[in-house]
C-alpha cells in the first residue's frame, strides 16, 4: 500500500458573475478568485485489488457524504476509470475548510485527490489532469491549476464571509 498526502487550499471569490446555464448542467461564471489560509489535508492510500473499492473517511466534519456524492470520491472514480486502473483506494479527509461557506472545500479536496493519485500512478500529464478536474466542476479546475502557487505561502489578509441561512 502506498500513501500520499496533499493540502487542499481554500479560495474566496473576490468577484463572481454567474451567467448562462450550460448543456452539462453547470453555469458559466466569470470570477476573480484568491487562495485563503485554510486547507484540508487529504491522504490517499492505494493497493492492488481485484475490484475497484473506494472509501472515504472524514474527520472534523460529520455531515459530509462519504460515497459517490462526495467530490473526492468522484475524483478518484474518474481517475481510476480513465487510467484503466483497478485498485483499493482509501481517502482520508481532515476538514479545516468550513462546509458550504463558498471556499471551494469540496472542489479542492477533489483536486488534491487527483494530484495524490497522479503522484502514485503518474498516469496523466498536468494538462490532462486539469481536463479531468474540469469534468468535476470549474472550481476543481482552478484549484488544480493554481495549487502550486499557494501551497508554499499562507495569505496574511483578513476577510469575512457571510453565509445566508445560518
Image (cartoon, grey):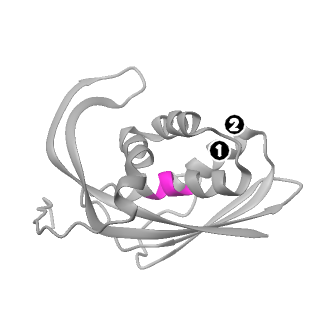
Determine the CA span between mark 1 and mark 2: 5 Å
> Measured along the vertical axis of the image, is residue 14 above or below residue 113?
above
**Range shown magenta:** 109-113
Which residue is painted at 27% across and 56% down in the image? 11
> Measured along the vertical axis of the image, is residue 152 above or below residue 141?
below
Residue at the top extreme of this rendering: 23
Q: Nearer the viewer, residue 53 or 158?
A: 158
In the picture, the quarter occupied by the N terminus is bottom right
Q: Position of residue 87 (x, y in %)?
A: 79, 55
> Mark 2 sits on what residue?
82
| Horizontal arrangement in the rendering, residue 15 relative to residue 112 (left or right) | left
> Measured along the vertical axis of the image, is residue 150 above or below residue 79?
below
Element at label 2? helix
Kindly indicate the quadrant of the structure image that contains residue 37.
bottom left
Q: Nearer the viewer, residue 70 or 85?
A: 85
Q: Is residue 70 visible?
A: no
> Mark 1 sits on what residue?
79
In the picture, the quarter occupied by the C terminus is bottom left
Which residue is painted at 57% across and 48% down in the image? 75
| Horizontal arrangement in the rendering, residue 30 relative to residue 129 (left or right) | left
- Report crowding for label 2: few under 14, some 14 to 19, many 20 or more residues within 10 A (C-alpha): few
Amino acid at each position: 500500500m502506498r500513501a500520499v498526502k496533499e493540502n487542499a487550499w481554500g479560495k474566496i471569490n473576490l468577484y463572481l458573475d454567474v451567467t448562462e446555464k450550460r448543456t452539462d448542467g453547470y453555469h458559466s461564471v466569470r470570477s476573480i478568485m484568491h487562495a485563503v489560509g485554510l486547507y484540508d489535508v487529504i491522504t490517499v492510500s492505494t493497493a492492488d485489488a481485484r475490484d475497484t473499492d473506494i472509501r472515504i473517511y472524514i474527520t472534523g466534519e460529520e455531515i459530509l457524504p462519504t460515497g459517490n456524492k462526495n467530490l473526492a470520491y468522484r475524483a478518484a472514480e474518474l481517475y481510476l476509470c480513465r487510467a484503466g486502473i483497478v485498485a483499493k483506494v482509501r481517502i482520508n479527509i481532515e476538514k479545516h475548510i468550513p462546509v458550504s461557506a463558498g471556499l471551494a472545500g469540496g472542489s479542492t479536496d477533489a483536486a488534491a485527490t487527483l494530484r495524490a493519485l497522479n503522484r502514485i500512478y503518474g498516469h496523466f500529464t498536468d494538462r490532462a489532469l486539469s481536463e479531468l478536474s474540469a469534468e468535476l466542476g470549474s472550481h476543481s479546475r482552478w484549484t488544480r491549476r493554481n495549487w502550486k502557487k499557494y501551497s508554499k505561502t499562507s495569505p496574511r489578509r483578513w476577510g469575512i464571509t457571510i453565509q445566508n441561512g445560518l
